[in-house]
Image (cartoon, grey):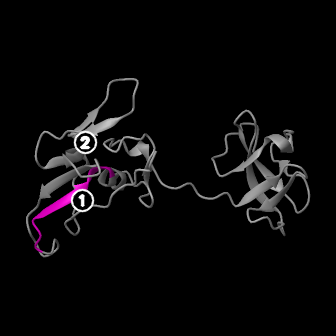
Amino acid sequence: MDRIRLISHPNPVPGVLPALDFIEKYVVRCPAGTAHQFWDTTAASRRLDSRGQAVLAVKVKPTASTHMKSRGVYSVVRALLEHKKMPLKGNVNTCGLSQCVNPTHWKGPTPPVPYKLDPERGVVHVSDGSTIRRDVAVRLRDLDGVVHVARALPDTLPVLLCGSRYDPMTVLVVTEPVTCTKGC
């Protein structure tokens, strides 16, 4: 499946972003059991672009702050993400439907994991394979899906802050939020 990338606003009016309540008025939510949301395209100003993504055409009063522009075209998903203060850079659709306007179905790239665990020796390395030179805090996810914080020293087995034991062959270094409830 090709990645569906979030489009930029095709032709925005400088300094203008359509109001959130105005945009949400035309979002069609699917019945319970699915989280998809679609764009009501019954009017010419509300349509899908050539890639199938929802766009909204708006009219505004031309002023000096809008550089005398009176019309603009906006990406619905991008406008929703902007209103919700969510990251915009590199967003791709995760549900596979380009028409879906649910902001939670559009995710930015995951940050690279800065460290990795050598499962055979049980020591933490920098992702490029070099040895860590000082102690670092890493997040380790165990087989149960619990994310712990561990203190890693050069050439030693990382120690979980909560005191739990783990098998270095079964944990992964991750960037996910900590979920340990035992004191990590």
State the image quarter where residue 115 is shown: bottom right
Q: Residue at x 24, y 52 (%)?
A: 50
| Earlier-in-chain disc, 2 versus 1 | 1
Question: Which amino acid, by three-letter code, is at mark 2?
Answer: Glu
Inspect the magenta stretch and tell me whether residue 71 lies in it: yes
| Residue toward you, 50 or 81 | 50
Question: Which amino acid, by three-letter code, is at mark 1?
Answer: Leu
| Residue toward you, 90 or 180 | 90
Residue 114 pos. (x, y %): 70, 61
Residue 15 pos. (x, y %): 23, 68
Dot 1 falls on a residue whose secondary structure is loop
Can you identify the residue that label 2 sits on?
Answer: 24
State the image quarter where residue 36 is shown: top left
State the image quarter where residue 145 is shown: top right
Magenta segment boundaries in residue numbering: 68-77
Q: Residues within 10 Å of mark 2 (few under 14, many from 20)?
A: few
Q: Residues within 10 Å of mark 1 (few under 14, many from 20)?
A: some
Can you identify the residue that label 1 sits on?
Answer: 17
Query: Is 165 situated above or below 136?
Result: above
Left or right: residue 8 compared with residue 117: left
